[in-house]
Structure formats: structure tokens, C-alpha cells
Image (cartoon, coloured by chain):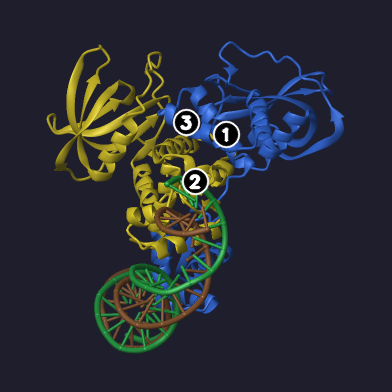
Chain colours: A blue, B yellow, C green, D brown
Amino acid sequence: MNVRMRKDAIVRSLRRNGTSTVAQLSEEVGASRRTILRDICSLRDEGFVIHSETGRGGGLQLDPQSLQTTARLSVAEVFALLISVASMRAAGNLPFAGLADRGLEKIEKALPPDKVRDLRRFLDCLYIGTLAPQIDTSNVGKMDAELLPAFETAFLKRLYLRFAYQDAKGATSTRCVEPQAMLILPPLWYLVAWDPERNDFRHFRMDRISAPTFVEGKTFRRRHVHFDDNVRPVR
Amino acid sequence: MNVRMRKDAIVRSLRRNGTSTVAQLSEEVGASRRTILRDICSLRDEGFVIHSETGRGGGLQLDPQSLQTTARLSVAEVFALLISVASMRAAGNLPFAGLADRGLEKIEKALPPDKVRDLRRFLDCLYIGTLAPQIDTSNVGKMDAELLPAFETAFLKRLYLRFAYQDAKGATSTRCVEPQAMLILPPLWYLVAWDPERNDFRHFRMDRISAPTFVEGKTFRRRHVHFDDNVRPVR
DNA sequence: TAAATAGTGCCAGAATTTGGCACTATTTGA
DNA sequence: TCAAATAGTGCCAAATTCTGGCACTATTTA
């Protein structure tokens, strides 16, 4: 058992179990209590945030926000970063824009070219504007991370998207639409889609969308979407 | 000189110089030829592709394709990305937060541990809130990318910061202050600092700050900064 | 108050890393 | 063809670091 392996084992164990005591970890990875404590110390040095509590029922806990051991960025992660920074810049909220941009350019360069094409085409579907002040933003939910890859595929392959939608009154319905654009009106994000049943465009708040699935083998054409004056493309 | 640090130094050197011989690296990082060769071997184990050529004019070369995506980012670029995404998340404007976070975690992981610590400490100085609606945001300038490294150093080393400040009327003055926090009230960014001349806190709009320099050898203590209710720490 | 917990300092022995040396294999230039 | 320059390997003793054990302290909970 290597030092690196032992520390990885500790991190895995903490991630899996939530809370462990030093004694449990010691038993589990086969090292003394003292060594575990030293490892915890060095993991903290490496940037892992590990909370600890003394007393009965206490123990060590890995902050879930803390670092992961894996190394390479997945394409989805790069997408998420790019969208974040691009939308922020468009909103004018981004200081040090030059630096962040340069960083992203380098990340882009490291991706396979076909992925970059996809990425750009996806970004082309993004629009940003300002929210009308009378809109109530007190109940903004969290978007599901699972939505991103689904939307990406739907936009790129022009696939009909079916999802569950919960409207403002809490009523849930199932929709099947042509995703045409994504609209950011901070802090709200909308899916702008053509609804064939209603024969019109509809806006869906993204934090109210769940369980997206594709309708395979059925594609659609892009439609011209008309936005208000205060809305413009992200790039 | 730690093993990890030495290996990092080797990678940096190869990245910088293109080709190096074992003897050069040995000289540069202060380890024996044998140790360098062992390190190269273990770097290869870790996934770095290092080409080697024997004979005159030969040496070691790091395959640029083999670099991890993040390895090419400068620390300042990573700072910029992190600050952007962290502030965006705090503002609630960030969808797919999980994905972007995971990407950033991996990027962080690729940085030297001491940088990660610095980074976290810097992020601890960031606060975010909402701007009072009566504030005029029609004349928001661009922040100088040069400000970021300067602020980073000032916050981490607690150095007095001297800069030129242009007030709302266009009048320019030179200030020398204790930087205590950075406040984001989208789309404006402020430096919150203690002004010893006025014996009080002052807010400086960051797009009106230029030519920052340190006052060497003069540090200050952190003060408790009181913010409005709508302001909270970024992390 | 006792038990359970994290955390620290110290030391001797265990384990690993390092440098040095002798060696092999390959390439280049004279 | 030969010598020099280079990468790479095996081995060993010395240097360094890691580890476990122990005795502590501090804090929390039942």
C-alpha cells in the first residue's frame, strides 16, 4: 500500500460513507491511527476540505465541494464552463474577461475539433437579455445537471425533446417540443421551443423542466426566433 | 525539495525548453542524473508522454498532445475562471453548476497545492450582493486584466495597495489603502478597502482603478467588514 | 463525570528514496 | 570506423522520510 493509494482510499471512503472516525479509517485502509491523521493533514494541504467533529458521534467528513481525484475534463464539463463564462461576459458581469477567455481558448484548443464545432453550434443557440423587473424571482429552483447533455444532443441533432414541466401553479404536464434556443434572463434560464401541439413558440423555465428524453428518428428544422430588443446572442 | 515538486519542476522545464537532456534537468532541479531518470519513468507512468532520443543533440521532449487540458492554463487564467464561475454561482445565474464545478475542481487539481490554498484564500475575500436599482450602470468600463494578479498578491500578503482612482466626476486621485474584500454587485465590482487617511472604509469601483502598485514591507491586519443583508460570501 | 472523539509531539525502527557507479544501447559527427 | 553524447538499467550503501506506538491535550456528548 502506497502513500498515494492510501490517501486515495481515504478520500474514497469518506466520499462513500459520509462520516468516518479515524479509528474506522485506520481499520479500513490498514494503517495506524497516527498515520491516518497525518494523511488527513496532508490531504487538507492538497486542498481537500475535511470537516472534523470531536466527541461521541463525531468524525471526519469530506466537504462534497472539495476536489476530485480525476484528471481530465469531460466535454460536458468544458461545455458547462464555456456556457458559464460566455453568458457572464454577455451579461457584462465578467471582470478579467481577457484572462478567462484566454483560459477557455486554450481549453477549446485541447478538445477534438469536432467537439469544438458542436460547442460553437450550441453556443449559437444561446441568447441573453434582462428580465422585466416585475417578474417574481423568489422561487428559482436548481437546474438538473442532467439537462445539459440532453439539451446539447437535442440542439445539435435537432431531436424532439419530451420532458415533464411544472408550471407556476405547480401543475405538471408532459411536453414534446422542438428546442430552438436557450434564453438567459438572469437569474432565470429559459428553453425557447416550438410547441407543435399549440402551433406556437413557448418559453419553459429550465428549473421547472425534468426527466428530458429524446424522440428518436424525428427531427425538425430551425425556425427564426424573434426576441425583444434587449436580447442578443451570446456570441 | 519534495518529490512532487521536483516532478512538477521537470514538467515545467520540459514545457518551457522544448527539449532538455537529463544532465540539464539534473543541474536545473538539483537532483542526480539517476533520480531524474527515475522521475521521468514515473511521470510516464502518470500518463505524460515523454519522447526521448539518444545520441548527440538528443534529449527528452514532452509531447504537447499529452498535456492535460488544464496544464496549459496559467494560474492567473485559472483564477479568472474560478472567480467568474464562483461569483456567477453565488449570484444564482449559473445553470449546470455541478458540471462547471467539477471541471474547475479538476483544473484546481492540476495546480500546485500552494496555489490552490492561495486561491481559496483569495476567494474567501469575495462577496456578492444585488445592486440598489437607482445606481446608474450606463457607464461601466472594462477592468484591467493587470488588476487581478496585483489584487491577488495584495490580498494574500496583506500588502498596502496604491493605485490611481478616477471618481464619478472624472477627477483622478492616488489612493493608498488596505484591501479587505472584493464586492460584486452585478454588473459592478468594488474593492472594499480601509482608507487610513480617512480612517474609514471606502468602496472603489474596479473599472475606475488603474496602475496598482504595492507598498512593500508594510502589512496590515484584516478588519471585520460589515455588509448589508443582501450581501453574502461567495463560498 | 466518563467515554468518545480529533489533534499534537516525540522517538526509534521500518521503509523508501537518493546518489554513485558500472554497465548497455543507440545516435551523431568527425 | 571510432569517439562522444545521449537514454536507460541494475545494484548497493547512505540519507531521508515514513510509520507505529505512546503519552499527551482539547472538545463534545451522554
Residue B119 position within the rendered picture, expressed as x and y whole percent measured from the top left: 38, 45
**Quarter of the view holding residue A126:** top right
Q: Which residue is mark 3?
A: A102
Task: Look at mark 1 in the image and give the residue it sits on.
Answer: A108
The chain letter for the residue carrying disc 2 is: B
Task: From the top left corner, tell me how far across and down residue A158 is, in percent.
Answer: 78, 28
Q: Circle 2: is it few (<14), some (14-19), or many (20+) Cα within 10 Å?
A: many
> CB atoms at circles 2 and 3 under 8 Å apart?
no
What residue did someone put label 2 on?
B107
Which of C29/A139 is in front?
Answer: C29
Please identify the quadrant where the C terminus of chain A is shown.
top right
Mark 1: amino acid: Glu
Query: What secondary structure is found at the residue carrying circle 2?
Result: helix
- Name the amino acid type tagged 2: Ile
Residue closer to the observer: A224 or B8: B8
Q: Where does residue B197 sit, x and y in percent of width and height?
A: 12, 30
Q: Nearer the viewer, mark 2 or mark 1?
A: 1
Q: Viewed as shown, does residue A69 lie left or right of B179?
A: right
**Which is more N-terminal, label 1 or label 3?**
3
Crowding at mark 1 (Cα within 10 Å: few <14, some 14-19, many 20+): some
Q: Residue at x 34, y 43 (%)?
A: B122
Q: Quadrant of residue B175?
A: top left
What is the C-alpha distance between the residues marked 2 and 3? 15 Å
A173 displayed left or right of D2: right
SS at circle 3: helix
What chain letter is assigned to the residue under label 3? A
